């Protein structure tokens, strides 16, 4: 998807009568058709269960939302699940994104459930934090193999005008052999067919600078920044742009502090490296913060050519070809940032082609879109 170019509103448009009828039929599934196996996870998003379809024996993952406050009788907003279902349906056929199976009604509560592909694999976060020694980096060939699949998944997702907005290790499933890689949880994704302004959502250490600066009309390049953060984390064994660990990051001060952490690694944007920087909504507060710092903290290099990124990832840790991918993804200016499609064409990947089996899978065309 070209940088900064808004796509035509084509993907999540009105469906034909036949497609709508099919979607309504899929929505009439009942949770009685499934037997719960175990609980896979829960959080602010809701709960995800592992279940088995009684008639076919197929194992699936079922997501349902919980009430915002357990002390109230307020019901979860079904629109959230329908929104995620539409995005997943728009991306059906993407081999590196968790598949969409349909919607189902809980016969007891009457609430809606989202039925998805079950992937028997841990998250990348769990793999790096639990399955390996804490803080142990992944070797470059392993990082390259995973990044190839992540970028392919993002490329196909962006081709359908869907932006994830929360790509991070916890939302990436990785099989132990490294051959299976899938992006999951499109709960806060957005269709670029919907007009801006877009909200500043995401997880702080993986938010793109334009989101942190409250740019209202960002695009799919925010996912590419997040993928650069994931790549750096795999190589370093730790998060590149740490935050303070708080759950809620809504204040401007939080965003400014996070931006300052990025500046200390990549240098301060200037008129040449990112002409739009000074006109973004939060830039004024960034500059106020800079002027309030003591002299010992004001010395920041101007422009990304003075970044410390290569110092953090020297040649013995990351080859020059690999560094060009990392640097291209972690570029301030979205107009100059690598798209997923362009990143896949760089020598780091071209010089190490995937196996014939992987090529065949990644070349599969996306099927006709189904809207729920």
Image (cartoon, rainbow, N blue to C red):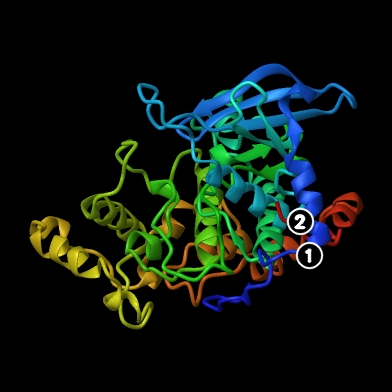
Q: Residue at point 71% right, 18% down?
A: 36
Q: State the residue position of label 1.
A: 16
Q: Is residue 54 above or below residue 74?
A: above
Residue 160 is drawn in which quadrant?
Answer: bottom right
Q: In this rendered view, identify the residue nearer to me: 2 or 132.
A: 2
- Left or right, 368 with respect to 139, comes to right
- Left or right, 199 with respect to 48, comes to left
Indicate the position of residue 289 as horizontal and vertical percent values.
Answer: 15, 60
Q: State the residue position of label 2.
A: 20
Q: In this rendered view, identify the residue nearer to me: 47 or 364.
A: 47
Q: Residue at point 52% right, 77% down?
A: 4
Residue 362 visible in this rendered orientation of the protein: yes
* C-alpha distance separating marks 1 and 2: 6 Å
Q: Which SS class for mark 1? A: loop
Q: Residues within 10 Å of mark 2 (few under 14, many from 20)?
A: some
Indicate the position of residue 82 as horizontal and vertical percent values.
Answer: 61, 47
* Tally of numbered tags: 2
- Cβ–Cβ below 8 Å for labels 1 and 2? yes
Q: Is residue 370 above or below residue 24?
A: below
Which quarter of the rendering shows the N terminus?
Answer: bottom right
- Left or right, 200 with respect to 61, comes to left
Indicate the position of residue 171 as horizontal and vertical percent values.
Answer: 57, 41
Q: Residue at point 67% right, 67% down?
A: 13
Q: Which SS class for mark 2? A: helix
Residue 137 is drawn in which quadrant?
Answer: top right
Q: Is residue 106 above or below residue 19?
A: above
């Amino acid at each position: 998807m070209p940088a900064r170019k808004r796509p035509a509103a084509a993907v999540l448009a009105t469906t034909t009568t036949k497609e709508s009828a099919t979607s309504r039929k899929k929505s009439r599934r009942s949770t009685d058709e499934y037997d719960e196996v175990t609980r896979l996870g829960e959080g602010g998003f809701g709960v995800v269960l592992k279940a088995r379809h009684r008639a076919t024996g197929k194992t699936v993952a079922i997501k349902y939302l919980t009430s915002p406050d357990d002390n109230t009788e307020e019901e979860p907003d079904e629109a959230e699940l329908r929104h995620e279902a539409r995005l997943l349906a728009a991306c059906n056929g993407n081999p590196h994104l968790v598949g969409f199976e349909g919607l189902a009604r809980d016969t007891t509560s009457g609430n809606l459930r989202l039925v998805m592909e079950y992937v028997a694999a841990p998250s990348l976060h769990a793999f790096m934090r639990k399955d390996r020694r804490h803080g142990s980096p992944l070797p470059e060939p392993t990082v390259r193999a995973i990044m190839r699949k992540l970028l392919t998944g993002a490329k196909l997702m962006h081709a359908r005008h869907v932006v994830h907005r929360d790509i991070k290790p916890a939302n990436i499933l990785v099989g132990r052999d490294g051959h299976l890689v899938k992006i999951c949880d499109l709960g806060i994704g957005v269709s670029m067919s919907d007009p801006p302004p877009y909200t500043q959502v995401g997880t702080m250490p993986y938010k793109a600078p334009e989101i942190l600066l409250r740019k209202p009309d960002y695009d799919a390049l925010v996912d590419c920044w997040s993928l650069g953060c994931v790549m750096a984390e795999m190589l370093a064994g730790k998060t590149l742009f740490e935050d303070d660990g708080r759950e809620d990051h809504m204040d401007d001060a939080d965003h400014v502090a996070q931006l300052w952490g990025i500046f200390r690694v990549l240098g301060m944007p200037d008129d040449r490296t990112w002409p739009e920087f000074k006109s973004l909504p939060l830039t004024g507060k960034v500059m106020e913060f800079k002027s309030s710092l003591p002299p010992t903290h004001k010395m920041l290099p101007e422009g990304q050519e003075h970044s410390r990124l290569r110092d953090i990832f020297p040649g013995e840790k990351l080859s020059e070809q690999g560094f060009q991918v990392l640097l291209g993804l972690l570029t301030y200016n979205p107009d100059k940032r690598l798209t997923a499609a362009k990143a896949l064409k760089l020598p780091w990947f071209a010089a190490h082609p995937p196996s014939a089996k992987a090529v065949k899978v990644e070349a599969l065309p996306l099927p006709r879109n189904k809207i729920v």
